Image (cartoon, helix red, strand yellow):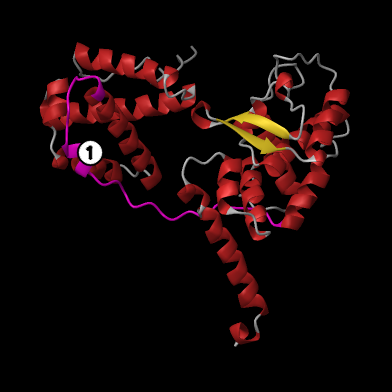
Amino acid sequence: MARPAPLTAAERQPVAADRGIRDALTNWRALLGAERRASEHTVEAYLRDVVAFLDFLTEHCGETVTVSVLVSLKTGDFRAWLAKRVGEGYARTSTARALSSVRMFFRYLDREGLGHNAAIGAVRGPRLPHSVPKALAGQETEDLMTAVAAPSRPDEPAWVAARDLAVLLLLYGCGLRISEALDLNLGDLPRDDALSVTGKGGKTRMVPILPVVRDAIADYIVRCPQSLVEDGPLFVGVRGGRLSPRTVQKRMQDLRAILGLPKEATPHALRHSFATHLLASGGDLRAIQELLGHASLSTTQRYTDVDSARLMDVYSRAHPRARK
């Protein structure tokens, strides 16, 4: 007998919460999708975190969770939840995300006039390791683009290789996220030298499109045997539907094995490479922020660490005094 599919976070409710909490979760979910324009996957993650927190409270407080219970929580209650996650082996990044989800839910309750809790503002999340974006070297990028332009198997249609090259060039040549590239429709193609891209939160930005990227897209369109329409997907799979990110990720995985690239060589690494290579060539940090669609300059500033790390590596290998 086949096992039933697991419930989604939208379908699952806290094991012991009153009607007010359940209604709040339902309304919050709708708000996340409509106002914040969060993806279904992101909404599911937020809800899963909050439902797990509410389940913890049922055991921790020994009673049905109500809005009044949430309002009365002290800093120690939140810390007990964080400590339990540590004991269960959750990664710090996962716990930081869960705390962010819970904070958002409490802000929603406050904004809707359902209840206010000041204690959560004093709770500090786990200290996260300082992560530096992983970028490919210039030659690695060139080798990758050369390899992707060739069919991966003898029986693979030539148009598939042309499609994959166009997608990867959009990531590296324009700094797009993979979701931004695959969400493009045929009608989104630029009539001039700039491409309008809709990123996170529904924000639109303009990015220059290089001739090599434009030519690769044009070559793919000419070769593609599928019927592409103005309001339909630009990049399609072999069955005609919108191209899946997993297909692109699988192609990168195959190319890593062929070229001996590190496991960090993912589609998203091409976006990092775009920013890192621009910065190394003297690009302005503010301009790179605009091109990437970062809301905060501090996010873009991570790439200065990448460039500093590269310079220190060059120094340690090349400077006479560094080898002593």
- The one nearer the camera, 150 or 298, is 298
Q: Position of residue 185 (x, y in %)?
A: 69, 21
Residue type, label 1: Trp
Is residue 121 placed above or below 49 in the rendered structure?
below
Left or right: 296 as drawn, with respect to 68: right
Extent of the magenta region: 111-137
Please name the predominant secondary structure of the magenta segment in the image. loop
Mark 1 closeness class: few <14, some 14–19, many ≥20 residues within 10 Å: some
Q: Nearer the viewer, residue 90 or 273?
A: 273
Within the magenta stretch, is there residue 134? yes
In this picture, residue 87 sits left or right of residue 184: left
Q: Is residue 237 above or below residue 95?
A: above
Q: Nearer the viewer, residue 210 or 264?
A: 210
What residue do we see at 63% from left, 56% from top? 279
Residue 103 appears in which quarter of the rendering?
top left
Residue pictured at 51% horizontal, 54% vertical: 302
Question: Is 170 a magenta residue?
Answer: no
The residue tagged 1 is 81
Q: Position of residue 129 (x, y in %)?
A: 41, 55
Asked whether the viewer can see residue 253, the reply is no
Dividing the picture into quarters, in which one does residue 165 lie? top right
